Amino acid sequence: MAQWTSAVGTAQLARLITSQQERPPAPGARKAPAYRTLADGIRLLVLEGRVPVAARLPAERELAVALSLSRTTVAAAYEALRTEGFLESRRGAGSWTSVPAGNPLPARGLEPLPPESLGSMIDLGCAALPAPEPWLTKAVQGALEELPPYAHTHGDYPAGLPALRRMLADRYTERGIPTMPEQIMVTTGAMGAIDAICSLFAGRGERIAVESPSYANILQLMRAAGARLVPVAMGAGLSGWDMDVWRQVLRDSAPRLAYVVADFHNPTGALASEEQRRAMVEAARSAGTVLIADETMAELQLDPEPAMPRPVCSFDPAGSTVITVGSASKAFWAGMRIGWVRAAPDVIRSLVAARAYADLGTPVLEQLAVNWLMRTGGWAEAVGMRRAQARENRDALVAAVRRELPDWEFDVPGGGLTLWARAGGLSGSRLAEVGERVGVRVPS
């Protein structure tokens, strides 16, 4: 059995390798042999986590054509990587990335700093902001007042509190997507929602198409579940999704699931147009792929223009192709671990049934707090505060990067919580290492 759990396409690997070579060599530096340059480039991509460990690489002939190199050069680079422990191969199964024994695996997720480190470190590695007070306190107080009737029950609500399911369904209906409470399941954050969806639809070895780059923690969740990730490269800047490439990937790979962040993509900040959303849904439907639409950033529009496009699920109102995931963690506060799923009623029933073997349900008090916020208008007030705070932070960061790092290239996102920059050919992992030493934490 092959030991790879994801695959890197020829075009994607060629693009990553070429981007490393855009920075000219230092004056007087000796030019390394072509095979050595290629081997070092792939090794660095693995160490930085930009190419996952246990990712299947393209065949030698395919990569040689894409890079305009001889097959002998690519074969020599692969052999050098095998010798150094960064590549494993098996006849008939291809070659896949690895790390030498004793080396730590590259960081795949983005763990928040421990609270005791917050005073000594500027943390730019976690897209989260402090709670929008006084609304957190008010919501908890309101929830406590409404708690007594629930305290007389068993407290297990696998599908979520009926009041909150109805509230979330009504909010979708107000956005133009008629929704019944039976189409909603409340989860423990968006991560809990996506974990439940992957467990139901994608067993070990199943393919999941994902954007590249994408949210690191979700990708790691899928890898840990044994899924085989099929990365689809994002376009330059804020251009986002190349639908011709997506159609080809969905047609050729026939993934069971596809995961997209169409609203202020994490980490590039791109916003999918209505045409891209419609085309994505149509392509998924034609391929028999279930499309997970992550809406966790949807309420964080920071600029008045352009107008927000319709939700992805509006192009599949019955929920047979699109499963939508939302959360209070980004729009309100990361400590409010309430997420939700919108899908067809039969999908919700299956997710709820499978939950009996997982976490049984989501904390009642937090559900009551979110429901109180949405019912009283506190949610809109709190999200407005969050937008203002994120806008101020974004503008300050953009000004600082332009002033201090004029060679860095980026497009200013119109929403979300991330800024994606090309660092002039510098290694992301080395920048992260230096940042840790001087008190600034950035993800590599």
Image (cartoon, rainbow, N blue to C red):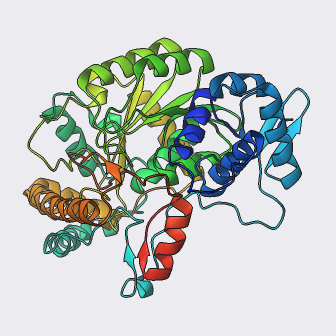
Where is residue 289? Give x, y as percent.
51, 22
Q: Nearer the viewer, residue 326 or 422?
A: 422
Residue 52 shown left or right of residue 97 in the figure: left
Q: Quadrant of residue 395?
A: bottom left
Nearer-the-camera pick, 421 or 324:
421
Judged left or right of residue 374, residue 105 is: right
Judge left or right: residue 169 versus residue 324. left
Looking at this rendering, what residue extends furthest in the top direction? 286
In this rendered view, identify the residue nearer to me: 180 or 307.
Answer: 307
At which x and y percent is residue 80?
84, 46
Quarter holding the N terminus is top right
Which residue in the rendered view is the most extreme toward the front?
A: 28
Q: Position of residue 290 (x, y in %)?
A: 48, 26
Establish if 333 lies above or below 314: below
Residue, x 13% and y 35% (percent of image)? 306
Q: Quadrant of residue 47?
A: bottom right
What residue is drawn where x is 58% and y is 49%?
50
Residue 260 lies left or right of residue 369; in this view the side is right
Image mark count: 0
Q: Position of residue 29 (x, y in %)?
A: 64, 56
Q: Is residue 173 visible?
A: yes
Q: Residue at x 42, y 55 (%)?
A: 423
Q: Nearer the viewer, residue 52 or 286?
A: 52
Q: Is residue 54 visible?
A: no
